[in-house]
Amino acid sequence: MTFIVGLILTIGSILGGYVALGGHLYVLWQPYEFIIILGSAIGSFFVANPMKVVKDTGTGIMEAIREATPKPQEYLDLLALLYGLMKELRSKSRTEMETHVDNPEESAIFKGYPAILKDHALMHFICDYARLIVIGNARTHEIEALMDEEIQTIGRDKLKVYYAMLGISDGLPALGIVAAVLGVIHAMGALNESPEVLGHLIGAALVGTFAGIFFSYGFFGPLATKIKSVREKKVRRYVIIKQTLLAFMNGAMPQVALEHGRKTISAYERPTINQVEEETMNHGAAARAA
């Protein structure tokens, strides 16, 4: 929602100010200038990035527009799942726990959280480290180092879209100049025309410079920043899992271990202790009833 509102304010302010100065909007409509600028930007984007990043860019843009960041309830679900998993780890045998982590789709613990089951990367991250805990021979500092390395890798992969969009944003002003130069070249071929025609051609050329700067700083740059913000919040869930499981491995009770994970959530979305306790108790009661 804020993305749409911000875009409307940006476009409205620029066009509104231009009209207030006495400018004519039809002069700004130069589709061929836009084709030169945006077409070359998209082409350079394909040149610079592998196909996986190209495909993920569409996903990243939609996430940014929809502001698909984890909601408070998603954090509660994640903490409740970890709580249930840690309780089972304390009370069940290795064989019983292996059935949960080896086949989470059929696990009674995971079935209560369908949103997490759909996020295969997050689910496998949980199961992989729960499996290491079940084995029982891993040292905490070794697990922590492994988690840090994996989270850094996940973060780098998630932010490739951000850097790709940033590359487009950085190149657009120069591509706008290219379009403007081509427009001036075209205008130079019409020097024998009337001043009115020549003025229109030069104005059209200058629209290229305007469009390149506007697309860079008014659209693609902010969009890249939005993608980065959304993706970083999604990666934060892995940090929650890391801190919770490490606290549990160091001997903390499940409820205390949850606090280690809860504290890593941004204060803007962090659930209260009471909310976490209520969520874990409710899911525990539901599991026993089932």
Image (spheres, rainbow, N blue to C red):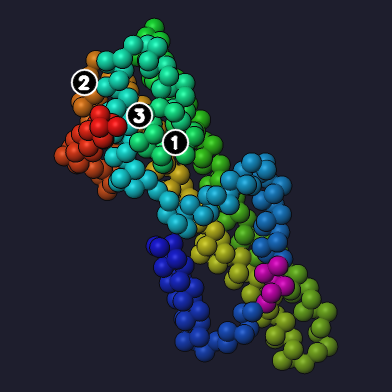
Q: Mark 2 vs mark 3: which is more N-terminal? A: 3
Measured along the vertical axis of the image, is residue 136 above or below residue 154? Answer: above
Residue 250 at what x, y percent from top left? 27, 15
Residue 52 at what x, y percent from top left? 64, 41
Residue 142 at what x, y percent from top left? 40, 14
Task: Report the quarter where the N terminus lies.
Answer: bottom left
Q: What residue would you read off at disc 2?
A: 253
Q: Nearer the viewer, mark 3 or mark 1?
A: 3
Do callouts 2 and 1 mark residues in contact (Cβ within 8 Å)? no
Q: Secondary structure at mark 2?
A: loop
Of 225 and 252, the residue lying toward us? 252
| Amino acid, disc 2 | Met
Q: How many residues crowd around disc 1 within 10 Å: few (fewer than 14), some, or many (20 or more)?
A: some
Q: Which label sits on residue 107?
A: none
Is 12 positioned to the left or the right of 220 in the image?
left
Q: What residue would you read off at disc 1?
A: 117
Is 167 positioned to the left or the right of 13 in the image?
right
Residue 32 part of the magenta-drawn span = yes
Of 64 and 97, the residue lying toward us? 97
Q: Secondary structure at mark 1?
A: helix
Residue 33 at what x, y percent from top left? 69, 71
Q: Nearer the viewer, mark 2 or mark 1?
A: 1
Residue 285 part of the magenta-drawn span = no
Residue occupying the far top of the picture? 137
Task: Report the quarter where the C terminus lies.
Answer: top left
Residue occupying the far left of the picture? 274
Q: CA distance from mark 2 to mark 3?
A: 18 Å
Which span is picked out in magenta? 30-35
Q: How many residues crowd around disc 2 within 10 Å: few (fewer than 14), some, or many (20 or more)?
A: some
Of 258 and 282, the residue lying toward us? 282
Q: Which label sits on residue 109?
A: 3
Measured along the vertical axis of the image, is residue 36 above or below residue 272? Answer: below
